Image: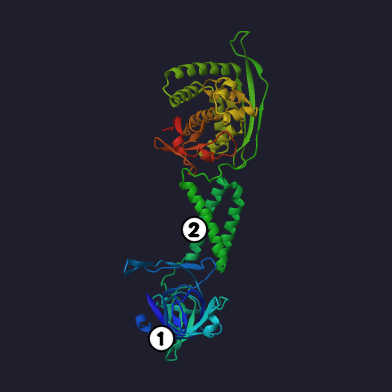
Amino acid sequence: MNYKYYKGDFTGLSNSKDLIITIGKHNFYDFNWSYFQVKNIKAIEAYDVEEEKVGDFYYSKKIVPKKSWMRPYFWKTQKPELIFKKGSFGIEYINISFPKLKKRPDVFISVNEDNYFNDNLHDVIIRDFKLEDSPNTYIKKEFIDLKGIIYFKIEIPEVAKSVENVVESNTGMNRSEKVDLTNEANVNTIQTSDNLDSLVTVSDNGTQDQIITTQPNSGNTFPKISAKSLGIVLGTLLWIIILAFFWVFFHKYYIFAVLAFVGWFISRFLSNRNFKAICNVFFAGAFLIFIASIFSNKATFVNPTIPKKDGTIKINPPKPVKREGASADDIDYEVSKDINWFDFINNKYELKYNTSVQSFFNSQKQHNEADIFFRKTSNNSISYFNKLFSKLELLDETKIDSIVRLISKKAELKKLNQLQTAEMVTTLIQEIPYVLVHQNTCQQIINSSPGDSFIVKYHEEHKPCMPNVPGGVQSPYEFLHNLKGDCDTRSLLGFAILKKLNIAASVWVSEAYGHSVLGIGLPIGNGVFKNINGLNHYPVELTAKGFRLGMIAPQHRDMSNWDIALYSNNY
């Protein structure tokens, strides 16, 4: 990297408590510049840093000016060293030198009345210090004014061929001026980066010395995309992903994400650094939330629910039905249901179906028999639920065919993919009001549960429940008949429907949480998951509205507390 060397008259303001040299009766330990100005700049030959360190001097390897309020401080690194001083009783003290937090100075290097330079300075040496005022006036001052001679160099890229040379002056108005370079004998042209302001100086021999920007002759006619334009395009694409993420999982704060995006987009076309910095902070914050949610499988900060429209459920009174070939006394009853619900993008669905009372009683009978058998043959609760869930799903497999066909037809009419179809099924089940299902009587279940448990509080609030249900779970057909179910009943129905729709699904149970959720083996990409036989299954809470696929309650997100009672990967 090339450098250009300069010399000028220095005036600076430093904290009087942090100084480095001795002037008169004042001891200076370390400078802490808040402001300095350089005038009468001259371009000079390369200087030897060590040779210029004579008399009272200040040296800094690099000074980075404060260009915005976002980065007012920096760490001044220095090599830590230990100093041992031995006395009559051994080591008297140890001096340890650590990096210090320093404030960036405001740097103003005058070029002429209209131009100034403000960029990084390298190998800065300030010599021949003089106090601006009488030394006695600084005894009680917080800051002191110093004058001296400054040597510094600036970093410049390699010289390149140019088609057009433009001097960019920084006058506070960001204006650009053309420069006549016909007299090249008296002008030293140096190419600089686009962010380097122009610096016009007078060298020792009286010739002009200009730092200018150039446009290289590319030699081809293909259009070039600037880094700024590419950054806007890529940033916009990333923002679209982030906005979609906020719409799904942070719907409550979606408007703030939109405002942040609008501010960020507008700031790309403005030159105000402070406004750009603020917009970048919002962008970084939204992006970090997005990344943390994707890669965390135990994150608890994500609000798992979003608001959605409420639907309606209507259960009509039973109607007597005489089956073909049945005796006059053998009368069945049909119960019709009409469920209206919405998904998370306000697609409206309606499901009308009938269930048979005789079929319901038949499912109950088979349910009781399976419960008795598996209680005798299971070694633990997980084994019991595995067998019971599997048996109940198998017993009702043909009974729910007509309902699955209705759901499949709706998915075809709306041209839903598997993810959208799974969301339609989960929102249908979420629309059904929660009813606690438990085995034994209400009093027995209260007596066997801790006083602060969910079951006890639920009964104290006199909410609806279904007692004396084997295993505390209803089969899919039983649930579709009476529409009364809690977590495991809902999960089992969701599994049975998705399996018949050829969508990978699972039923999760947790003794630690006393809960059950439905798992969906689709590439959802957000939320927690468990890998089941090579396929990631994402859970979804079915006992309340607003839970998207992959979302469960924050207190249930530890995957080690979940066991898989039933699954189907459909391959």
* Residue 60 horizontal/vertical position (percent): 42, 75
Instruction: Relative to 514, say whether 22 is above or below.
Output: below
* Residue 506 horizontal/vertical position (percent): 47, 32
Q: From the viewer's perspective, is the residue at label 2 or at label 1 nearer?
A: 1
Name the residue at the bottom extreme. Answer: 205
Marks 2 & 1, CB-CB < 8 Å contact: no
Q: Is residue 345 visible?
A: yes
C-alpha span from label 2 to label 1: 44 Å
> Neighbour class for label 2 at 10 Å: few (<14), some, many (≥20)?
few
- Residue occupying image coordinates x 56% and y 49%: 246
Q: Which residue is mark 2?
A: 234
Amino acid found under the numbered disc labelled 1: Ile
- Residue occupying image coordinates x 63% and y 19%: 334
Task: Judge by depth and name the residue closer to the eye, 112 or 378.
Answer: 378
Name the residue at the right extreme. Answer: 317
Amino acid found under the numbered disc labelled 2: Leu
Quarter of the picture holding the N terminus: bottom left
Instruction: Relative to 531, say whether 117 is above or below.
Output: below
Determine the secondary structure under disc 1.
strand
Q: Which residue is mark 1?
A: 44
* Residue 458 horizontal/vertical position (percent): 61, 29
* Residue 160 horizontal/vertical position (percent): 40, 77
Task: Judge by depth and name the residue closer to the eye, 169 or 286.
Answer: 286
Side (left or right) of 303 relative to 384: right
Quarter of the picture holding the C terminus: top left
Determine the secondary structure under disc 2.
helix
Q: Is residue 551 visible?
A: no
- Residue occupying image coordinates x 39% and y 68%: 97
Task: Judge by depth and name the residue closer to the eye, 123 or 479.
Answer: 123
> Neighbour class for label 1 at 10 Å: few (<14), some, many (≥20)?
some
Residue 482's disc is none
* Labels 2 and 1: the sequence-earlier one: 1
